[in-house]
Image (tube, rainbow, N blue to C red):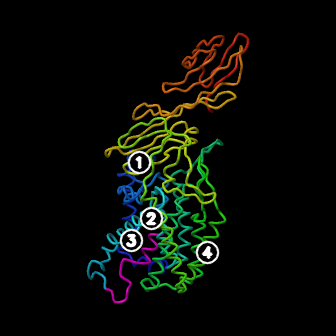
Amino acid sequence: MPAGIDAYRRRLCARVPLTTLVTAGLLLGVYLLVQDAVTSWGAPISIPYRAWGYRYATGWLLAPFAHVSPGHLIGNLIGLAVFGTILEATVGHYPLRRGAVSFRGLRQHPWVRAVVVGPGVLMLVGVGLNLVALGPTIGFSTVVFWLMGVLVVLRPTLAVVGLLLTDALRVGYLAVAAPRVAVAAQAQFVTPWFAEVALQAHAVGLLAGILMGLLLRRRGAIPTEAAGLHVAAGVVLIGVDRALWAVFFYEGGGTYVLYRAVGVAALLVVSVLIMAAVTGDRRAHAVLVGLAVALAVVAVPYNVVPPATVDGTDRSLPVGPYAVSYGEAVPDASVDRIPLEAGPLSTQVTTSGVIVEDPTRGIWITAVSARELAFEQRATIPLAVDGARVDVEVVADRWRVQGNDSVYRVRTIAPTSSSLFESPPSTAGPVIAGEQVTLVASPEGFLVRSAGRTRPLPGVNETVQLGPLRIRAGEDRVVAIGPDARATVFSRPS
């Protein structure tokens, strides 16, 4: 074993990164037991464990340790394993301060530092950063960014090596978890990747870690001679690799605007300030503190003000304390808690899809967007009611109308059957025997209308008579048949 690596390992109790292992066990335990991933590994309960604001303590206490999917959890576990282990070996379980004696009191006891103090610090960092995170955040990534921030100031080369190592471990994990993947060319519903990144929370986490690293460096608690240029270069590489340049804003209706040039310029400016602060420039250090505080303060009003109750949904299904509904082009109460109008930037945006809300706890989220539901045709939303898992299953029944807008209805099939929404009627373009056929969505199902008559849409291989037309339904299309002609009027989405 190289002498350098062995020197790091000697700083750890039993040469094991106990703090990292204990913390990883905590994350896995929350995912399996609190979020009920034991029942469904791929669909944990996540909505109640997001940070919905200061009035909902369960959310902001558990959000740093909860995750929305296996990939989300594994990604943060890998980041913790790499950066946590490197930083833990750098700091060590045995006191490095001159004159300090191990095992003299609990604060100096290596095992206490490894198993209690270390995990406790990471938990406090997670909760503290979560209190100044913008939006209903969830996940351990803010703490991983904090670890990167501390490490890049103390050991910039190791921080960059850690970036490469995390990428390698992710590929290795995927190679084991899914050694062979067959993918067919097909249409997919995809949300822009940058819209799913908690940019503000990640930036605050990294800056907080950098400031902690600067404090440790100034006090000489951790010996380091890393040059300011190397630290700045490490920050740039972290920012590029972890997409801290992906500044975006909402435009509404599922559309987002990415300001790439602004983000890259901001990353470069901050790296220059960090380089100056490392070399002892107090003004640069003060600017960094001010920037971190400003980014954190932005989140405070959002966490204080609860989302407004939004009108525009037809009806809702009560599921314990939650109300599940469907709306189209309704005000997005999750974004517009604090009204903002600044040129093209505005928080007054709309959203469409399945909405889950609980006013008493400040929960309001578009759990499944209208576009995703239209594409997938069904979705499952796991919730926690009185400590038990409740899966809300939503289905979108849709017919394409020949030459006109589609007609659809959104309903739940579990835990109870309930109709949430019906789209307006739509008339097919073909004219047969001087008549056209209109499709109508109702809470009970679909109706067909023609020649002044309305009947339920026939079942598969069944027929109804509407004046001169016979309406016959197949598996995936409905045909109107006249005395001298026939035409497909409705069809199922492919």
- Looking at marks 3 and 4 on the same chain, the residue that comes earlier in the sequence is marked by 3
Circle 2 residue? 132
**Could you tell which of marks 2 and 3 lies nearer the N-terminus?**
3
Q: Say if 43 sits above or below 240 in the image.
A: above
- Structural crowding at the residue carrying mark 2, measured as other residues with C-alpha within 10 Å and reported as few (<14), some (14–19) or many (≥20): many
Q: What residue type is labelled 3?
A: Val
Gap in Å between the C-alphas at discs 4 and 1?
40 Å
- In the picture of the structure, the residue carrying the numbered disc 3 is 16
Mark 3 nearby-residue class (10 Å; few <14, some 14–19, many ≥20)? some
* Disc on res. 269: 4
Q: Marks 1 and 3, how far apart in space?
A: 32 Å
Nearer to us: label 4 or label 1: 4
For marks 2 and 4, the one nearer the N-term is: 2
The percent coordinates of residue 314 (x first, y second) are: 48, 35
Choose mark 1 or mark 3, whichever is in front.
1
Q: Is residue 183 above or below residue 129?
A: above
Could you give the CA–CA distance between mark 2 and mark 3, rounded to whole angstroms? 33 Å
Identified by mark 2, the residue type is Val
Query: Residue 175 placed where, x, y %?
Result: 55, 55
User: Label 4 amino acid?
Assistant: Val
Secondary structure of the residue carrying tag 3 is: loop
Residue 329, relative to residue 94: is it above or below?
A: above
Residue found 63% across the figure and 11% down from its top: 467
Label pair 1/2, CB-CB below 8 angstroms: no
The amino acid on which the numbered mark 1 sits, given as a three-letter code, is Ile
Q: What stretch is highlighted in magenta?
A: 82-100
Q: In the structure shown, which secondary structural element does the residue marked by tag 1 occupy?
A: loop
Dot 4 or dot 1, earlier in sequence? 1
Of residue 224 and residue 240, the one placed in the foreground of this image is: 240
Disc 4 residue crowd, few under 14, some 14–19, many 20+, Cα 10 Å: few
Mark 2 falls on what kind of element? loop
Residue 45, labelled with which disc? 1
